[in-house]
Image (spheres, rainbow, N blue to C red):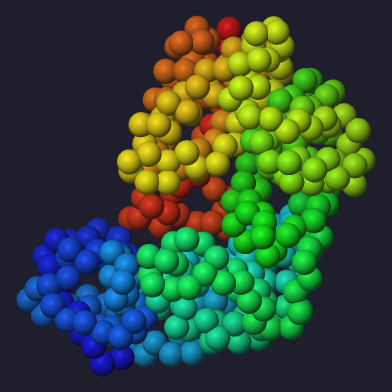
Amino acid sequence: MDSTITITARGEQRIQGGHFWIYRSDIASGSAAPGEVVRVVGPRGRFLGQAFFSGRSQITLRMLTSRDVQIDRPFWRRRVEDAVRFRDRLKIDASAYRVVHGEGDLIPSLIVDRYGDYVVMQTLSQGADRLQAEFAEILVEVLQPKGILARNDPRVRLLEGLEQSVDVLHGEVPEKVTVKEGQIEYDVDLRSGQKTGAFLDQRENRVAAAEYTSGKVLDCFSYAGGFALQLASRATELTALDISEDATALLAQNAQRNHLPNVSVRTTNVFDELRALERVGERYDTIVLDPPAFAKTKDAIPKAEAGYKEINLRALKLLRPGGFLITCSCSYHVNESAFAGIVLDAALDARADVSVVEKRMQSRDHPVVLGMPETYYLKCFVLRKLS
């Protein structure tokens, strides 16, 4: 590490406020090689810490530490070991979970998920990507997996000037891996499944939702059945809806595999289906709304808000009094306060009195950094319809 980057007073305030990212607009002077670890100083030359440097992304600096220490292989190994120890303390009742959650584990832009004997990693910045081989070696030493897959196909890598690819870095990785989540067992496609293979950030919300489940259940945007499989044993009947034929086929297989004959699956547009169910007078005791991110950019916020209101309005009309709605948003650009306001507007239009039983977030193995609202992206409300 030879390069020094000077940031503006605004950038310095950002770091002092607990944020780990410095944008290009707050770089006063200096440059470095792509992915290099650099010294960061304020406008008066005060040492602020060390960071990954990006020559392409608007996020030019990702802070690693506020200390003037050697950032080498032992440094990274300690960080990985700390992350693993934290997960061990959580006593996770699943064989698939997140091991390293980027900034939440002080290893910015590195994602590591464990699926039984296999590990999937993502390096989402020039800095993390430059160290990919080193991170893989450390993971082999610490976790001793049978195989490591680099699932580097997210579009965010393009913003860093990085190629999209999927590569085996260690051992062998099968096309599908069987994992357990509590009493449920299902297959995960590590190479082409959502995210690194499955939606691990909803794991604890699925378990919590089961506690409120009874009677007739409707699971919307069900994908491969994360919520449906957990809730089915508490339901008299469960209907799962998703627009993807591949997802619904996999869900049906998973239901059969887990001996859940009360699960029926429909391949359909959820927006259209909710309106159709309302027209024919269907009613449910428990409804789950777990849509994909409607707002991936700021420009998409108005359309996303309309989409969230529509599905929550329809769900509340379909819900029986005394029933529970588990409603989620994984759009960072729609924060918790905005999401609560959308749900309130939906309840008012549905003429439903609603109470909040729980407000939840992503699973604990996906920790939020207190000074970084970007790391708090998943909102999950458990609501009770009073009338």
**Relative vertical location of residue 361 with respect to residue 316 in this rendering, above or below:** below
Determine the image quadrant of residue 122. Answer: bottom right
Query: Residue 234's x, y, as percent?
Result: 81, 30
Question: Looking at the image, can residue 65 be seen?
Answer: no
Who's the residue at 24% across and 64% down the image?
A: 23
Query: Residue 108's x, y, as percent?
Result: 42, 69
Determine the image quadrant of residue 207. Answer: top right
Q: Is residue 201 left or right of residue 372?
A: right
Quadrant position of the N terminus in the picture: bottom left
**Relative vertical location of residue 96 with respect to residue 138 in this rendering, above or below:** above
Toward the left, the furthest residue is 44
Question: Looking at the image, can residue 1 be seen?
Answer: yes
Nearer to the camera, 240 or 136: 240
Who's the residue at 63% across and 29% down the image?
A: 269
Quadrant position of the C terminus in the picture: top right
The total of numbered circles placed on residues is 0
Nearer to the camera, 287 or 209: 287
Who's the residue at 73% across and 33% down the image?
A: 267
Who's the residue at 63% across and 76% down the image?
A: 167
Query: Residue 382's x, y, as percent?
Result: 58, 29
Q: Is residue 287 left or right of residue 172?
A: left
Q: Is residue 17 left or right of residue 310?
A: left
Query: Residue 159's x, y, as percent?
Result: 38, 65
